[in-house]
Image: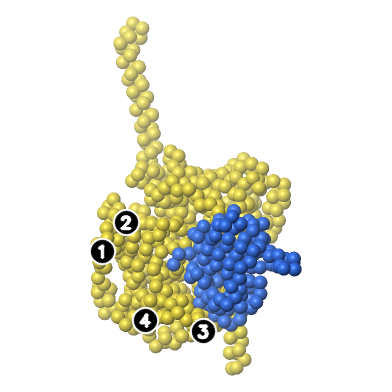
Chain colours: A yellow, B blue
Amino acid sequence: MLLRNPKATLVAVLILSAALISCSRSSSSSSSTAIPRTADGKPDLSGIWQVRNEAAADLEDHIARFEMPAGKGVVQGGPIPYQEWAAKKKIENAKNRRTLDPLENCYLPGVPRIMYMEFPFQIFQTPDHIAMTFEWSQVHRTIYTNGSPALEGIDFWMGDSRGRWEGDTLVVDVKDHNDRTWFDKAGNFHSENLHLVERYTLKDVNTIAYEATIEDPKVFTRPWTISMLLHRQTDADRIFEYQCQAEKEEANGAFEPDTKTWYPGPSVPVQTPPEWKDVQTAWKAPERKGEIKRLADGKPDLQGYFMSDGGGANYGLGFHEQDFLTPAGRGVISDPPDGILPMQAWAKTEAASRKLPERGYDDPTAHCFVAGVPRSMYVPSPLQILQPPGYVVILHERMAWRTIPLDGRPHLPDHMRLWQGDSVGKWEGDTLVIETTNLNGKAWLNEVGEIQSHAARVVERLTPISADTIQYDATVSDPLVYTRPWTISFPINRQKDELLEVACHEDNQDLQHLKDIRDEARAKARGSN
Amino acid sequence: MKSYRLAILLAILGWVVVPVAAHHSFSAEYDFNKPLKLKGKVTEMKWANPHAWIYIDVVGKNGKVEKWAWETGGANALYRRGWRKEDLVAGTMLVIDGYQARNGSNTANATSITFENGKKLFAASSSQGGASGPK
């Protein structure tokens, strides 16, 4: 029949091939509509993720040990191909993990270990950067997808991550590792020559296939690969904090509670005088000094790397001359007009006490804990701002992050208290207004011990006044410490450098000295009583 | 650690032996009246925050090797001033400028290093106002 009617055959072939093409198209389009995509068409990895495996205990097949649940290995075609010397070292590591595991000292876990720990993390995606904020110790990673090269001549606990899209897979080169991180609790390790290639593929809306190929010719006989799934936390709309070092020191008594400022629990509600609200509404937007950048939706584009011109606020919010102990400060208190913190009487006494040498140990930043809000914004260290859809994210070089949702959600329940508090944001004209509550009252405002309690409500306003400058104003209402609300103001200036990494307690040699001073003062006080 | 002021307290109270890594005031520990220039061979470079350290061997007049520890700004500040790990491996010859410690030990605060090829890098130390990076 076909031969007898060549025209019909041609038509039939055309129809058939058209059908095949459309069929293959529809199957590819059905798989691509199954995953969320960003405005620029890339798979959208945004969300809160966590593994459901026991790779954190041991990458290889393992039976249960103390504090280590049993689990199937994630090494493809295992075992891990160690060189002979390295296999011996791994066994020694495992034997002595209680003292040798870097996580026992709350050191930064490194990559890939951070990706499969027992804590969730959140991914924020913009065309140029993919930021990952981890619940564990407020660690963050930035994967640069702007084509910039890895830094050379420096190393990091968390490595240097540069990504690119290969089809729908995000491929990340992670270089510049140090030799101090492990892969798991079982003592699997690498050298500073580690080169990692990670692959992130969104399988469906709630699943990322994660693969990492590990190359380290100093330790292994060949490259090897781990693979696992990351699962979306569909019942969570934020992650919390697990401040490893702070939790550890609170648990073992090395960091003591301060009943004057710490959150005492829900049984003691705090009343804020109603007239304090007026101070908030009195704020006036600063004058614009140049053109500002805008996002596609017309909102100001605050993204980039910045350094606060904090005017010495980290050493005193008011004006102060340089003395032997303290760098000078121009004073950043814009309200009250006299530039002096309106402390209650008890707070003046307490602030004076915090200046004594034996109180030095009590400053949380002496322990390398996070700085809190607003102090995170004026510690002398750079920050990066990202604006993924629905959020403003601030990454601090001194390993801490703030994620500020813009979806109008309410604050956390009052009894949920965090070092960095709970921040929610909204745009008022060209000003980003961030309200932070739920602080735990553990942070100090600066090195001279100016005080903030758990009752503080912090309203920050970030207003771009030119392409390279953001005017920063923060009003603190803390009825337990002050007689009225007060406001600090300073510019935050753009800089060209990417963030590096400050792993604070990698070399925190002074804490023991501070403790000795405190203990000596206590012993003396006991003796004189 | 991140504390500038507390570390100075330590210094005043005499707790600072060497090496101390902190944002301490220059004058608490080092002496502007003791400028120092030494040529030596790098034995170790400790890249750390908030301060890094260079350890060098210096051949003295009598031919004896003296060990010196030089404090600099933090690793990040050094990186931002052009320092790179591969330039400072053990064996590298350097001339280091700076100021000696008040206690007279073989410890000093570096202001700059000069390589044999004449390349000079500033050391971002506390006397130059910045341990953690740009201010």
- Marks 3 and 1 sit apart, C-alpha to C-alpha, by 43 Å
Disc 1 chain ID: A
- Marks 1 and 2 sit apart, C-alpha to C-alpha, by 14 Å
Please give the count of numbered marks on the rendered protein: 4
Q: Are marks 4 and 3 in contact (CB under 8 Å)?
A: no
Disc 4 chain ID: A
Disc 2 and disc 3 on one polypeptide chain = yes
Question: Measuring 47% from the left and 78% from the top, which residue is drawn there?
Answer: A326
Instruction: Write down the residue under mark 1.
Output: A288
Left or right of residue A451: residue A184: right
Q: Position of residue A116 (x, y in %)?
A: 53, 53
Can you name the residue that lies furthest to the top here? A4
Disc 3 and disc 1 on one polypeptide chain = yes
Give the mark nearer the N terminus: 4 vs 3: 4
| Badge 3 amino acid | Leu
Q: Which mark is residue A301?
A: 2
Q: Are marks 1 and 4 in contact (CB under 8 Å)?
A: no
| Badge 2 amino acid | Asp
Q: Are marks 1 and 2 in contact (CB under 8 Å)?
A: no
- Marks 4 and 3 sit apart, C-alpha to C-alpha, by 19 Å
Q: Secondary structure at mark 1?
A: loop
Q: Quadrant of residue A446?
A: bottom left
Give the mark nearer the N terminus: 1 vs 2: 1
Q: Quadrant where the N terminus of chain A lies?
A: top left
Mark nearest the camera among 1 and 2 is 1
Whether residue A506 is situated above or below residue A259 in the rendered picture = above
Give the mark nearer the N terminus: 1 vs 4: 1
Q: Nearer the viewer, residue A454 or A289?
A: A289
Q: Which mark is residue A341?
A: 4
